[in-house]
Amino acid sequence: MIRITDLKKAFGRKVVLDGISFGLDRGESLVVIGGSGTGKSVLLKCLLGLEDADSGTITIAGLNRPRPHELAAQVGMLFQGGALFDSLPVWQNVAFRLLRGPARLDKAQARALATEKLARVGLGAEVGDLFPAELSGGMQKRVGLARAIAGDPPVLFFDEPTAGLDPIMAAVINALIREIVSEMGATAITITHDMRTLRDVADRVAMLHEGRFYWQGTADEALSTDDPVLQQFTQGRTTGPIPTLR
């Protein structure tokens, strides 16, 4: 479902991605970890076509080097900050993609589908008439998740899905992601610093370090390995091979 080969991206002399290669089959969930500034967001932007990679191949859902408009029906995205439209009620946020494009639904159909997706993430139909500013952080994340799964896309991307949430709400979001990915049979990529998310969501883990996938394996292997780089990151140590001042 996703195949990336020798992906490279630099900004001037700053090399951010230096040969990323991986593949994901339908239904697999990959969690990408790595320190701040290591290129996780750049990788996601390249996959979404928001940044042009300098070289390498990107194939997503059978599309080669897809542009954002080509991915619209194939990919759902949960943004780190929610990225909800403040001027639109919740139901229109959830149905935003479904109200536009060649396969657009009428408002009644779109609202019904939005209500269905809100229910799937534990929110009642009455929430659909609220505006994002009236929601808590956890509710905004759930609305963002409902929007990501509207249209049942085969590929899902999650950018720091638990950022800014308390531990209980973070666990709720992780559980929803795991359940929804399993139910939909979707292929998922999650970017996170949260080891709870790694444990709850990942089938596989990849650590982005010095421009490459330094390490790949299962969640259990990631949390039990004696590799000094991975161990320093997962255990939050201030000493080790990863410099703490950069």
Image (tube, rainbow, N blue to C red):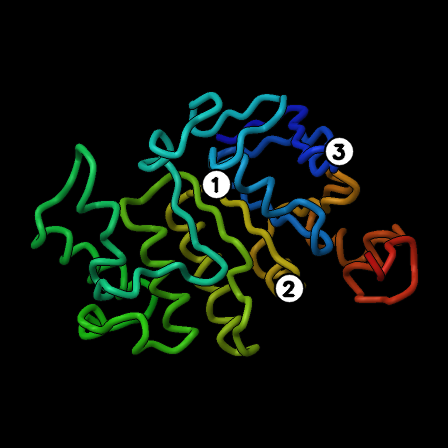
Which of pointers 2 and 3 indicates the residue nearer the eye?
3
Residue 181: x and y, percent?
A: 44, 50
Residue 78: x and y, percent?
A: 43, 54
Q: Which mark is residue 194?
A: 2
**Disc 2 or 1, which lies upstream in sequence?**
1
Q: How many marks?
A: 3
Q: Quadrant of the C terminus?
A: bottom right
Q: Which residue is mark 1?
A: 187
Please state if 5 lies on the left or on the right of 64 as rendered: right
Q: Are marks 2 and 1 in contact (CB under 8 Å)?
A: no
Which of pointers 1 and 3 indicates the residue nearer the eye?
3
Q: Quadrant of residue 195?
A: bottom right
Q: Are marks 2 and 3 in contact (CB under 8 Å)?
A: no
Label 3's element? loop
Residue at image point 77% right, 61% down: 234
Q: Which mark is residue 42?
A: none
Label 2's element? loop
Residue at image point 42% right, 43% down: 185
Kind of residue at disc 2? Asp
| CA gap, disc 1 and disc 3 | 33 Å
Taking 55 as reference, is 116 above or below it? Answer: below
Kind of residue at disc 1? Thr
User: 68 or 121: nearer the eye?
Assistant: 68
Residue at image point 55% right, 59% down: 160
Residue at image point 15% right, 52% down: 110
**Disc 2 or 3, which lies upstream in sequence?**
3
Kind of residue at disc 3? Arg
Taking 152 as reference, is 220 above or below it? Answer: below
